[in-house]
Amino acid sequence: MVTLLKPVEEIWQPQDFLPNPCSDAFFDQIKELRERVQELPDEYLVVLVGDMITEEALPTYETMANNAEGIRDITTSSPAPWARWVRGWTAEENRHGDLLNKYLYLSGRVDMKQIEKTIQYLLRSGSDSKSKNDAYRGAIYTSFQERATRISHANTARLAKQHGDAKLAQICGIISADEKRHETAYVRFVGKLFEVDPDYSMLAFADMMRMNLAMPGRFMYDGYDENLFGHFALVAQKLGVYTAEDYADILEYLVGKWKVQKLTGLSSEAQEAQDFLCQLTNKLRRIGERAQARANQASIVHPFSWIFGRKLKF
């Protein structure tokens, strides 16, 4: 896994994509940025803010990754491969929230104080991956989430380009590329677990999916909206940034990648888990279709404090 980390001197930094404060053209660069973002609709801004806030809760995710039984690093500086990976992964992920936060701040299109309060609330609330501090479950959860964030950032990149902000499209695209690399590391790790311990890996995978994977930002709160994450997720669904279909697609991908259907010699309990996982994708698609049909017959008008209380219909 550690080999998938990039050297600090070679990897991109947020400043590579932002106005240069040391340049005489700094204020002109900010003016150009603000002109570009004027065409971004409120719905897009809400999704971009929600993605950024999720990234900014990184301290919680590092704690979760470093708290698994058997691979926990109590020193926070261990030379063990897992400890080195977690620190390196955290260092790379930290750039994502930094870059999006600064870009949104310079845009002048969003209420930064409300966003900052939401970040603080989320960090205070923490997150529950339901992995039970189990290394298998934790790695399965992160494999799923890294692919989900890759999809989300890739779609915000696509939409930014459609709305005329090529720089923001580049930013979201390069973040998505990072997430893809991190996804590869976690998926390989779990793939190895399935090779050496297929029974327990199968049970852990099924257990996580039975509980429905909890999204990392689901405890979002801005001081006003008790269901902020739910409303943000509905906007993301409407824009096609991250959808119920994506959730089913990720499951289908992981089932195939880890060769779940092809494994043999399992215990009876693991075989039941295998059957459950192999049938779950189609079940999720049917549920998603029914939910979408219901959603098409209803609409919500809801204000978002992140965009100064302006209302969105979804």
Image (cartoon, helix red, strand yellow):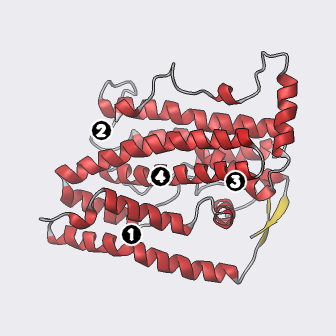
Q: CA distance from mark 3 to mark 2?
A: 40 Å
Q: Which mark is residue 71?
A: 2
Q: Position of residue 67 (x, y in %)?
A: 38, 41
Query: In terms of secondary structure, where does tag 3 sit?
Result: helix
- First in sequence: mark 3 or mark 1? 3
Q: Residues within 10 Å of mark 4 (few under 14, many from 20)?
A: many
- First in sequence: mark 2 or mark 4? 2
Query: In terms of secondary structure, where does tag 1 sit?
Result: helix
Quadrant in which the C terminus appears: bottom right
Report the amino acid beneath label 3. Leu
Q: Look at 65% across and 52% down and name the residue there.
A: 158
Q: Is residue 239 above or below residue 281?
A: above
Q: Look at 33% across and 69% down and name the residue there.
A: 277
Q: Look at 11% across and 65% down and name the residue there.
A: 265
- First in sequence: mark 2 or mark 1? 2
| Residue 106 falls in image quadrant | top right
